[in-house]
Amino acid sequence: MFKKILIANRGEIALRVIRACREMGIKTVAVYSEADAQSLHVRAADESVCVGPADAAASYRNIPNILSAAEITDAEAIHPGYGFLAEDPNFAEVCASAGIKFIGPTPENIKLMGNKAKAREMMAKAGVPVIPGSQGVINDDREAQRLARKIGLPIIIKSANGGGGRGLRLVHTEVSLPNAFLTAQTESLAGFGSADVYIEKYLGESRHIEIQILADDRGRVVHLGERECSIQRRHQKLVEESPSPALTEKLRRRMGDAAVEAAKAVRYRNAGTVEFLLDGKMNFYFLEMNTRIQVEHPVTEMVTGLDLVKEQILIASGQPLRFKQRDISYRGHCIEVRVNAEHPEHFTPSPGEIAEFIPPGGPGVRVDTAVYSRYRVPPHYDSLLAKVLAYGQTREEAVSRITRALDETVLTGVHTTIPLLQKIVQDPDFRRGKYTTSFVDRFVPRA
């Protein structure tokens, strides 16, 4: 087992990893930018190293500085969290070359699944259902038009190397396709260093379902059930829950089995998430695979009783999975909401000083956060302030508890998404579990 782990991240996920390490008796090293000198993850770690100025490219994404911090503190492994370097195959390779264990999948896993077009091809070969679309990268708008006529409009143009809604364009008419194609290519090149794009049929009224998997070095793979992630804005998730109110036991098993086959097809290792779209006829299709711990991983922890960060560390240290698929059980229901420092009407960042923060509590409530009263939210990074989770024996109890938790939360000084989240959890369709990826449009029209 590792004696010391460096966390190459910040905020709540860095603090989350530190807590898991502390329970396992592992020393931790925090890295931080000059803007994060007063962050809670810096205070909580056993050691801390400043790795650069506020700009993430010069600090949290600065591979030489991160590795230097690991070397001078004798850290044996690096946990990348999510974001920043978590899905950078070059970083995983450099860690291996330096003799430092990367707590995550192999560079090959990251590289293959990072290219969404190649991932589609691989999944199709493995027998995992994929959305109708291009067999690979589309090179020009004429080729895109031919494919659009074949599969039918609307279609969605996606960056092969993208994520988070960048390099993505929805096309409803053939006349708008050339401009959308060029825009997607331009955004993809600017955001991800590659203009490669591919095309899929757009599934309008669909649900976004993801399956958590764990895989060890011996080729053993298990899934930990699903998370419903349909409530999102600009492809950014706002609310997650498990189990999904849409899935039957039979469909849950089929999707879980497909996720396991997807992981086996690429010889996946460590924690990952296989994401699917579920249409109105209960047909599911592979969307993408995230090669890291997810923001919403606590939802799965609450219903399975497993600590996913600890499992990541155990797998990375060479230990086999401690359980088989038949050992995994699900209890109760969990809902998570993301509280961001944003104007809830138009989702623009709202940095500044938090005047007062009083988190919710009580039975079944969990809060993952790294902010506190008088903490200054920097403008340089993701706007996530806290993840508030509510667990109940039934979905009805979980809904009641997340409603209460949001009402209890006091967070002033910056704008937050709490008012929007309150509207969502009180909506009759949400309470009935009847929603799709277009659900949030009724509260905030699409930009």
Image (spheres, rainbow, N blue to C red):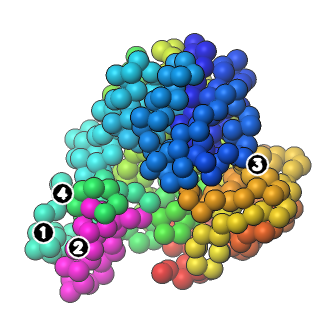
How many residues crowd mark 4 within 10 Å: few (<14), some (14–19), many (20+)? some
Dot 4 corresponds to which residue?
137
Q: Nearer the viewer, residue 381 or 180?
A: 381
First reached walking from the N terminus: tag 2 or tag 1: 1
Q: Answer yes or no: do the residues labelled 2 and 1 have beta carbons within 8 Å?
A: yes
| Image quadrant in which you'd find residue 221 | top left
Q: Is residue 429 magenta?
A: no
Q: Which mark is residue 445?
A: none
**Secondary structure that dominates the magenta span:** helix
Where are the magenta residues, as a range?
165-189
Dot 2 corresponds to which residue?
181
Q: Residue at x 24, y 56 (%)?
A: 194
Tell me the amino acid under the disc marked 1.
Asp
First reached walking from the N terminus: tag 4 or tag 3: 4
Tell me the amino acid under the disc marked 3.
Val
Q: Nearer the viewer, residue 139 or 376?
A: 376
Q: Residue at x 55, y 65 (%)?
A: 232
Q: Answer yes or no: do the residues labelled 1 and 4 have beta carbons within 8 Å?
A: no
Image-based side of 15 in relation to 411, left or right: left
Tell me residue 283's x, y (percent): 39, 57
Q: Is residue 263 visible?
A: no
First reached walking from the N terminus: tag 1 or tag 3: 1
